[in-house]
Image: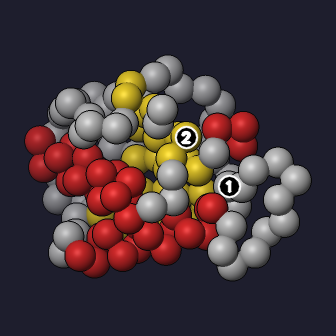
């Protein structure tokens, strides 16, 4: 099941919310290709952001690694004044991408922790993420 680390209240700024997506996530031993899971996740999240008209609120930042290699596709949301939100064990599908974008928009708009959408669950953070 996908999991994420919860966000704390932000300062309500209008700065776009950074959304990192690991572009290299793939099962152990699978070669990197244009269609491996991480590349597909970046593509699906890009599409979900466009469809949600969320490009002003969320900035997508494909990244080489989010240190969750043993947990499948991974994304991270970095609220300006709160702990990071890490989502892992994600399927590189449009449905998952839409859930990620909806959740990121809710966090950005509310300025505080909100309940995750169905299919995403809370879990503890591990490892460093970019700042």
The answer to which of 54 and 36 lies nearer the viewer is 36
The answer to which of 13 and 108 lies nearer the viewer is 108
Q: Is residue 82 visible?
A: no
Image point (33%, 44%), residue name: 79
Q: Which residue is mark 1?
A: 25
The local secondary structure at tag 1 comes to: loop
**Residue density around tag 1, few if under 14, some if 14–19, many if 20 or more, within 10 Å:** many
**Residue density around tag 2, few if under 14, some if 14–19, many if 20 or more, within 10 Å:** some
Horizontal side of residue 12 vs 7, given as left or right: left
The local secondary structure at tag 2 comes to: strand
Image point (49%, 20%), residue name: 124
Q: Is residue 19 visible?
A: yes
Image point (61%, 26%), residue name: 126
Q: Which mark is residue 90?
A: none
Q: Position of residue 100 (x, y in %)?
A: 34, 52
Quarter of the image holding residue 63? bottom right
Is 78 located above or below residue 95 in the figure? Answer: above
Q: How is the image coloured?
A: secondary structure
Q: Position of residue 95 (x, y in %)?
A: 34, 58
Q: Is the C-beta separation of discs 1 and 2 under 8 Å? A: no
Q: CA distance from mark 1 to mark 2?
A: 10 Å
Image point (21%, 30%), residue name: 115
The answer to which of 72 and 111 lies nearer the viewer is 72
Is 98 located above or below residue 112 in the figure? Answer: below
Q: Considering only order in the chain, which callout, 2 or 1, is on the residue closer to the N terminus?
A: 1
Q: Which residue is mark 2?
A: 89
Q: Position of residue 103 (x, y in %)?
A: 26, 47
The answer to which of 5 and 94 lies nearer the viewer is 94
Horizontal side of residue 86 vs 64, given as left or right: left
């Amino acid at each position: 099941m996908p999991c994420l680390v919860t966000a704390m209240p932000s300062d309500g700024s209008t700065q776009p919310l950074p959304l990192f997506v690991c572009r290299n996530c793939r099962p152990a031993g699978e070669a990197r290709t244009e269609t491996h899971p991480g590349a597909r996740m970046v593509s699906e999240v890009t599409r979900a952001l466009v469809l949600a008209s969320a490009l002003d609120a969320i900035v997508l930042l494909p990244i080489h690694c989010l240190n969750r290699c043993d947990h499948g596709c991974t994304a991270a949301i970095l609220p300006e004044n709160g702990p990071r939100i890490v989502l892992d064990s994600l399927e590189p599908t449009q449905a998952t991408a839409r859930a990620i974008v909806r959740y990121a928009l809710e966090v950005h708009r509310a300025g505080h922790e909100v309940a995750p959408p169905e299919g995403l669950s809370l879990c503890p953070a591990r490892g460093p993420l970019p700042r």
